Image (cartoon, helix red, strand yellow):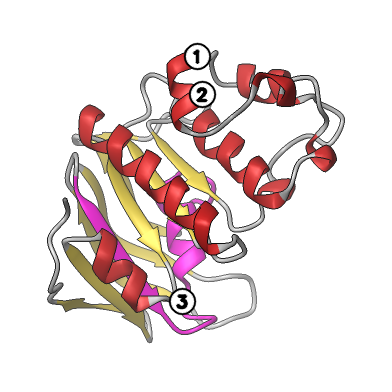
């Protein structure tokens, strides 16, 4: 289980975003996180992935703290994939940074072999997002923080990306936290949803079950 306990975090010279925030995500669970802009959704996602460190409290996987370096079991996926890759690396090297995905999985995510020798700026936003999602599925990764990853994509690419991720996560019992302003999307994808406001999480009842 991915668990955050009693987190306190604030940027310098600001009121803390959270004081005693706690959250858990079970293996194979899809949890939705909504909230207004500036509420701290992305900050919470980065704390869960070990990209930020809380002033107080802790984040753990199965009771163990996240490793300080190397491939972590929790991976954060950004809304803008071009900000998370080296612009001078070709796609093949970007993937190999984490692992070498098998061909069947590349096909499931719609990644063509001719993309591998391209630079990131030669791909569309949707194509690059597929690459970044696949890069995050390296062996040993157990939880994904999907932070508005489909907001900028066209409707067809959105559906294809979520379908591929749903299938993979279901087969590998991958826990996924979906951060989005789109509550209809969260209702379709997630079996549990929480809303972040004023540093507090409030539970919502989801009306749809995960396929």
Q: Return the x and y of residue 128 as percentages of the image width and height.
A: 67, 41
Q: Residue at x 54, y 29 (%)?
A: 135
Q: Which residues are magenta?
A: 29-54
Q: Nearer the viewer, mark 2 or mark 3?
A: 2
Q: Dividing the image into 4 quarters, which one contains the N terminus?
A: top left
| Residue corresponding to mark 2 | 106
Looking at this view, name the residue that lies furthest to the front. Answer: 156
User: Relative to 96, does residue 124 appear above or below in the rendering?
Assistant: below
Q: Secondary structure at mark 2?
A: helix
Q: Is residue 58 visible?
A: yes
Q: Which mark is residue 103?
A: 1
Gap between marks 3 and 1 measured at Cα: 43 Å
User: Relative to 20, does residue 71 appear above or below in the rendering?
Assistant: above
| Residue corresponding to mark 3 | 17
Q: Is residue 54 visible?
A: no
Q: Residue at x 38, y 35 (%)?
A: 66
| Label 3 CA crowd tier, 10 Å (few <14, some 14–19, many 20+) | many
156 sits left or right of 86 in the view: left
């Amino acid at each position: 289980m991915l668990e955050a306990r009693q987190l306190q975090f604030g940027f310098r010279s600001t009121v803390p975003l959270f004081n005693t925030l706690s959250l858990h995500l079970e293996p194979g669970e899809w949890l939705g996180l909504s909230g207004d802009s500036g509420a701290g959704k992305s900050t919470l996602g980065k704390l869960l992935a070990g990209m930020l460190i809380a002033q107080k409290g802790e984040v753990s996987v199965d009771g163990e703290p996240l490793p300080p370096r190397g491939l972590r079991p929790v991976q954060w996926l950004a809304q803008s994939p071009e900000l998370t890759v080296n612009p001078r690396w070709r796609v093949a090297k970007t993937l190999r940074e984490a692992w070498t995905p098998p061909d069947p999985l590349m096909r499931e995510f719609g990644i063509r072999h001719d993309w591998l020798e391209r630079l990131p700026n030669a791909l569309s936003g949707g194509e690059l997002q597929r690459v970044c999602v696949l890069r995050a599925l390296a062996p040993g990764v157990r939880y994904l923080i999907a932070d508005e990853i489909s907001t900028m994509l066209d409707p067809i690419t959105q559906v294809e990306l979520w379908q591929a991720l749903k299938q993979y996560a279901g087969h590998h019992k991958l826990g996924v936290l979906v951060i989005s302003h789109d509550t209809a999307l969260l209702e379709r994808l997630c079996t549990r949803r929480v809303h972040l406001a004023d540093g507090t999480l409030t539970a919502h009842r989801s009306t749809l079950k995960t396929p």
